Image (tube, grey):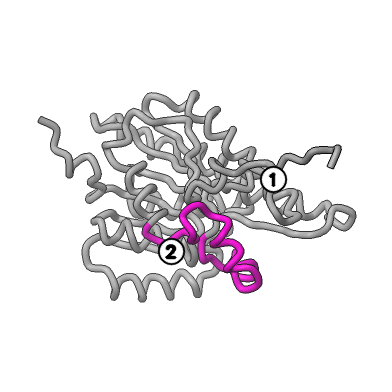
Amino acid sequence: MTDTPALFDVSGHTVLVTGGARGIGRWLAEGLLAAGATVLVSTRRPDAAAEMETELAEAVAVGRFHAIAADISTEEGCQALVEGVRGYTDRLDGLVNNAGATWGAPFDEFPPDAWDKVLGANLKAPFRLSQLLRPLLDARADAGLDPARIINIGSIDGLAVPNYENYSYAASKAAVHHLTKVMANTLAPKILVNAVAPGPFPTRMMKWVLDERGEEVNKANPLGRIGRPEDVTALVTFLLAPGSSYITGTTIPLDGGLTSTMSVAMYDDNE
């Protein structure tokens, strides 16, 4: 008989979460630590890395935690992060590509730099890190265990037309969803690659929207609320755990049914 709890067990796993200083990355770091994983987190600022080391070491006693300062928007930063990871482990069980950037501006004012910055952070960096870390991820299957995992954090802005003019962000997330499929095909069977497309969550990126239109955002959702930290932690933990070993190449909307149930108003031209 299948040991059901073991299907959701990530204790003893070593997982790298990029962009872990705040928001979804921080929630994932805390949740995975509480589940007994060794969590490596990247953040751009050395002071943020040092602060996380102190805070999470005091708050969580189950797993182990290390923060690495690296700017993965650059090739040098990607290389530095990989070297930092190798300093802690010779096998990586999971990579969560969470770090990203956004940019909002009207169509006629949207600058060329917004494409370079956002696609570099949201699309190029996840691919490059997956490429550089492939030997450490392959090592899990080489050890006779179930496949390693890569989880790309996308967005519902890559599934449907967003309500705000964030052209490079929406395009980058749609590309991440498709890149997930292509990588899944290439890296199987040793590595499974999936994406999560979060809807509204109480992150810094969403703060101004929630401050101005929070009630409207809640009402627009079939469940009447925005996402909670445990929603994203639960899904990502499952995708890292043995129970998801037959899932690859998929993008899972994590939005309370927002994109799945949206409808288009129909108008009668004769009225």
Which picture quadrant has residue 52? bottom left
Does the image show residue 205? Answer: no
Which picture quadrant has residue 17? bottom left
Instruction: Report x, y in % for residue 31.
Output: 33, 59
Residue at horizontal 48 percent and vertical 29 percent from the top: 184
State the residue in front, 268 or 142.
268
Which residue is most to the front? Answer: 271
Which picture quadrant has residue 106? bottom right
Instruction: Report x, y in % for residue 264.
Output: 68, 41
- On the rendered structure, is 130 left or right of 137? right
Instruction: Report x, y in % for residue 245.
Output: 32, 32
Instruction: Report x, y in % for residue 68.
Output: 45, 61
- Secondary structure, mark 2, is helix
Residue at horizontal 86 percent and vertical 38 percent from the top: 270
Based on the picture, tell me whether residue 223 belongs to the magenta stretch. Answer: yes
Above or below residue 119? Residue 50 is below
State the residue in front, 13 or 169.
169
Based on the picture, tell me whether residue 259 belongs to the magenta stretch. Answer: no
Residue at horizontal 37 percent and vertical 28 percent from the top: 190
Are discs 1 and 2 less than 8 Å apart at CB? no
Determine which residue is flagged by label 2: 26
Above or below residue 114? Residue 160 is above
Which residue is most to the right? Answer: 108
Under mark 1, the amino acid is Val
Under mark 2, the amino acid is Arg
Q: Which mark is residue 161?
A: 1
- Measure the alpha-carbon separation of dots 1 and 2: 27 Å
Which residue is most to the left? Answer: 1
Residue interval drawn in magenta: 201-230
